[in-house]
């Protein structure tokens, strides 16, 4: 059963639902969240898509094949979000590693542009693999 989420109740690896989309919380700092969308798997797959294991899909009520699209979006916590579950540790670690790899790849491909997450947020990730991307 979905529960309305307060910012204090949310943690990394939680899956929340907004009006139209399911999101995985990749990083939580204060009232700011770094989210990646959880979408049905389509024919064209991106290099940073992480398939959702069927066990997690069953637990989250996702019928069919779903992927975590490792493209970060920054939002304020609790804005119409309902917590619907939590990813398994292994799936979350895989998604977080894919996100770090994708952001590093974007930095290499477009060195003249600031990385999306850096330009869009002021989140600092001390002592974390994503720190190299956000700092």
Image (cartoon, helix red, strand yellow):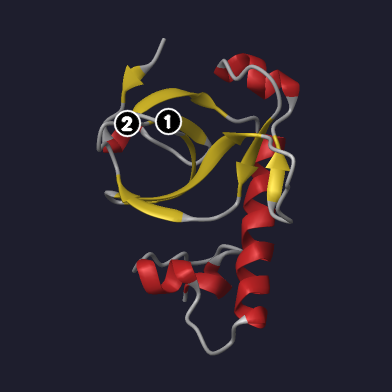
Say what secondary structure mark 2 lies in. loop
- Could you say where residue 21 lies in the image, as x and y percent from the top left? 44, 33
Q: Residue at x 34, y 69 (%)?
A: 122
Horizontal arrangement in the rendering, residue 78 relative to residue 15 (left or right): left
Mark 1 Cα shell of 10 Å, populated few (<14), some (14-19), many (≥20): many
Residue at far bottom of view: 112
Q: Is 7 placed above or below 129 here?
A: above
Say what secondary structure mark 1 lies in. strand
Residue at far top of view: 1
Quarter assignment of residue 129: bottom right
Q: Earlier in the sequence, mark 1 or mark 2?
A: 1
- Could you say where residue 100 lies in the image, as x and y percent from the top left? 63, 62
Q: Residue at x 73, y 48 (%)?
A: 45
Q: Residue at x 74, y 28 (%)?
A: 53
Quarter assignment of residue 47: bottom right
Q: Residue 96 has which mark?
A: none
Q: Are marks 1 and 2 in contact (CB under 8 Å)?
A: yes
Q: Is 119 placed above or below 89 here?
A: below
- Could you say where residue 5 lies in the image, as x and y percent from the top left? 30, 28
Residue at far front of view: 43
- Could you say where residue 56 lies in the image, as x and y percent from the top left? 66, 23
Mark 2 Cα shell of 10 Å, populated few (<14), some (14-19), many (≥20): many
Q: Is 91 placed above or below 58 here?
A: below
Q: Residue at x 39, y 16 (%)?
A: 2
Closer to us: 126 or 4: 4
Q: Which residue is mark 2?
A: 81
Closer to us: 39 or 117: 39
Q: Which residue is mark 1?
A: 16
Horizontal arrangement in the rendering, residue 73 relative to residue 133 (left or right): left
Whole-number angstrom distance, CA of label 1 to CA of label 2: 6 Å
Horizontal arrangement in the rendering, residue 11 relative to residue 93 (left or right): left
């Amino acid at each position: 059963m979905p529960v309305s989420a307060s910012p204090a109740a949310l943690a990394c690896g939680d899956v929340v639902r907004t009006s139209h989309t399911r999101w995985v919380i990749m990083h939580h700092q204060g009232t700011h969240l770094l989210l990646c969308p959880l979408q049905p798997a389509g024919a064209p797959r991106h290099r940073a898509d992480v398939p959702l294991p069927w066990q997690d899909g069953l637990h989250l009520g996702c019928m069919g094949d779903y992927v975590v699209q490792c493209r970060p979006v920054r939002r304020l916590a609790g804005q119409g979000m309902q917590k619907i579950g939590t990813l398994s540790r292994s799936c979350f670690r895989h998604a977080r590693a894919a996100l770090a790899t994708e952001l590093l790849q974007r930095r290499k491909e477009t060195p003249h542009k600031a990385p999306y997450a850096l330009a869009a947020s002021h989140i600092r990730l001390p002592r974390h693999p994503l720190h190299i991307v956000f700092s």
